[in-house]
Amino acid sequence: MTAEPTILSPSALQLLDLVAAFLAEELMPAQVDTKLRFRTRVAASLVRSARRELAEQGQFPMDMASLRSLVEDLSQGRRELTDPDTYEMAVRLVEAKLAIVTGGE
Amino acid sequence: MSGDLSNSSLADARRELLAAALAKGLRTPIQVASLQLAAGGNSRETWVAEVCLGAQMRRVVLRCDPDHWIRPVEMTREIKGLELAASAGVPVPKILVSCRMVELERPYVVTEFVEGTAIARQIMREPGYAAARAGFARQCGEILARLHGAGQLAQDWSAYDPIGDLEWHLNNTDFPSPVLTGAIRWLERNRPALERPPSPVHRDFRLGNLMMQPSGICAVLDWETCQLGDPVEDLAWLCCRSWRYGSDLPVGGLGSMSDLLNVYQGVTGSAVDPERLHWWTVYAETRWGLAGMARQRDGSAGDVMEQAAMARRACRQEHNVLLELKRYVAPA
């Protein structure tokens, strides 16, 4: 989290940190209903995940257009997922997604 | 969500449904003493009730479709699955009455209440379930062998196209996935032919759908996906990475493949082809990945949020699919 002041302060990323912390540390433990408790934890996790995605913008190994093109090639049989190059590309894409979604959680 | 009944008027409506079903089905005086909505998903309501049947107090379970999602095909499968299972010696809750016997305003089935837990975390952790854990893989092998051997009881079941099934789900996803698209094409190109007539398969046999007691599995639940197919699908689905709950053991995180297969092969009298099993393993991981990516349905803000969390985690399943396909990738 950057220490530099921003025009609008706290920044969007900082807000997400604060809201996630509130959900996890105060709201979740106060829930008696198990479903709400679970969902509050999920909410905190999703806010942290959104924060990571925004902070990591541009870190995916391909853009949406390339991804759609790859899907089309695979769908039409022009490329196969078990081809070494395609497989490697898929691994890198999924690992980039995992880093944001799980972020070590 | 507009059109929803309040909790208490929903319970009243279900109380009426249950009373009518049991009264007409069992032809005995019936009174519903209590009715509670049990924990469950969005797709089906599960109510636990105490009822007075004649002079006896009993606990029963009512499963029915909610207003926003009536699915008669799935309920019919559920009922037929429960009926076949009972005849085949597979442990299941006993049906008391269903919409196939007494037609009411929505698809439903009423079964006896079975004591136990289906919650994976409890089964994995509680000391009282140690014996159940130890025998889990072998018991699964025996139960599945009995189910798969009951083909003669499944004459009126329908078959399905496994690849078509995946493609339907792919069309129902919200975002493109190269991994799942590519996996479906791989599965289609490498599909093993069915060598025997199709068998009754459960298609969602896994920890989470198995009611357990300290002594072991006491009831197999959730039969709405059951159809005629390749029995190896059930073996592979049971061993999916997503329900190993952090354990290294492949069978529901509790047991070994050799325990499962030795018993299964012993009871069925035939060997499971390892290549076929692995094809269905790739299939299982792909199918579960597609389930997580499904287009978000209606529901409360909390429901939609939970679905969104699952869709975000699709990459975990994509990772599992890539792991299973690795052995087929030629060295670069």
Image (cartoon, helix red, strand yellow):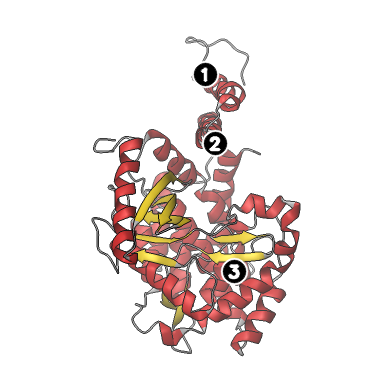
- In terms of secondary structure, where does tag 2 sit? helix
Q: Answer with the quarter of the image where residue B26 lies.
A: bottom left
The image quadrant where one finds the C terminus of chain B is: bottom right
Q: Is residue A6 above or below residue B55?
A: above
Label 2 neighbour load within 10 Å: few <14, some 14-19, many 20+: few
Q: Amino acid at mark 1?
A: Leu
- In terms of secondary structure, where does tag 1 sit? helix
The residue wearing badge 3 is B329
Mark 2 belongs to which subunit? A
Label 3 neighbour load within 10 Å: few <14, some 14-19, many 20+: some
The answer to whether tags 1 and 2 share a subunit is yes
The residue wearing badge 1 is A15
Mark 3 belongs to which subunit? B
Q: Which mark is residue A34?
A: 2
Residue B20 at x, y = what percent? 28, 56
Q: Answer with the quarter of the image where residue A56 lies.
A: top right
The answer to whether tags 3 and 2 share a subunit is no
The answer to whether tags 3 and 1 share a subunit is no
> Which residue sits at x=44%, y=70%?
B82
